[in-house]
Amino acid sequence: MRWMRAAGRGLLVLAVVMTGYAVSGVHADDSDAAGRGPLTLATAGDLTGYLGPLLQGWNRTHPGERVTLVELPDSADETYAQMVTDLRGGDRSRFDVLNIDVNWTSEFAAAGWIRPLPRNHFPLDTFLPSVVDTATYDGHLYAVPYVTNAGLLLYRKDILDKEGVPPPRTWAELEHDAKTIAPKYGLDGYAGQFLPYEGLTVNAAEAVYSAGGTILGDEGERVTVDSAAAREGIGFLARGFREGWIPKQALTYKEEESKDAFQDGRLLFLRNWPYAYAVASAQGSKIAGKIGAVPLPGRDGPGRSVLGGSNLAVNTHARHPDSAARLIAYLTSERVQRQVLTRGALPPVRAALYQDPALVRKFPYLPTLRAALGAAKPRPKSPHYDQVSLVVQAVVHDALTGQQTPAAAVRRLARELDAVARR
């Protein structure tokens, strides 16, 4: 997927004036202004290779505010661990701007590692409404949405067309097709990301949300998971493994492994992020031209995805906070956001781009993704999110492997999450 080239220069026309920052346009060299100078941008591993070349556009026009890109591991869990270790160093931190997973915003804000940003000083009304909530904590803006994501159901369009069957809208339809159609073509039925890591938390939350349930409320202070909806959602996934229309191999899948299984022609249905559609549709793929994408199915109709993506935040101890704010404004400007999509295959946060005819022609899943994003929900917000996610992973994995019934797993989940909330 490393097809990226350098981004254009001089992209920022937005004027932003912030308490503690002054973002008033792009000039060739403002390094002698207060709060301006070189920066480091820390991010998880750039799988598409787009970000380094894009930042070259900034560096060419801002020689006194050059950005050094620090790529951390591809794994979200490992990136989180390295960021937290660095941030705990206080003013010894190496990172100025942080490209953080959307679910870390609350935890980083509660810990005092990132600084609050004035909400009315960013053009948030031009962003997708659902993404802004991922950048807030306790009613305050602590980051600016950068890229977003929603899970989609990818399917073998050629096979469903041959069978005269529309893509599934409900769990019952998905289960039926996975049981009856997939075996006729020597395929497994359905897979998501079920290895015990952050991806399992996402898949479990989507199952609970798609049945009408929730996991936490009140910024993590209230546990709401002990419900019939949660039992039904976890039960749906557990039944798939028990009955075999979700293959046991899927217990080892992260995003890439599940994408590879689909792209190699081993799956009829796959839950994954839109990048998997782009890769599987690329020239040279075994299934190019043979796939489609729809919103995730739910209990009674289209379900709810978890919001993915990342937000840009400023380290409380950033060396040059004005430059940090200027960089964030650059990266979230509409022209750069367009390149985030066209060069990185990452869904942008600017709403207008989802209605751009040229982009829709190039990325035909955009209308579907826009609908999925409109219904999507953030992962459970908590200042102890890392612990919340570890609990969800452990308990749900036991349910999927048959070590606990879904009902017992949900009761245990409620108990263990309540212990986390009380810390």
Image: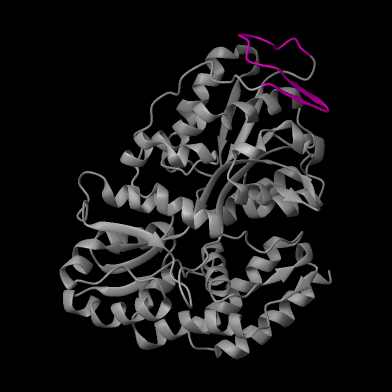
Q: Does the image show residue 247?
A: no
Q: Residue at x 17, y 74 (%)?
A: 185
Q: Residue at x 52, y 65 (%)?
A: 304
Residue 286 at x, y = what percent? 19, 54
Q: Residue at x 56, y 56 (%)?
A: 307
Q: Quadrant of the C terminus?
A: bottom right
Q: Verify whether residue 76 appears in magenta.
A: no
Residue 386 falls left or right of residue 43: right
Q: Nearest the camera: 226 or 56?
A: 226
Q: Residue at x 41, y 49 (%)?
A: 367
Residue 75 falls left or right of residue 385: left
Against 276, is 64 above or below? above
Q: Verify whether residue 29 appears in magenta.
A: yes
Q: Quadrant of the N terminus?
A: top left
Against 396, is 273 above or below? above
Residue 147 at x, y = what percent? 54, 43
Q: For the magenta stretch, what is the residue range?
A: 15-33
Against 174, is 11 above or below? above
Magenta residues, dominant SS class = loop
Residue 264 at x, y = what percent? 24, 60
* Corner quadrant of residue 99: top right
Q: Nearest the camera: 104 or 300?
A: 300
Count of numbered labels shown in the rendering: 0
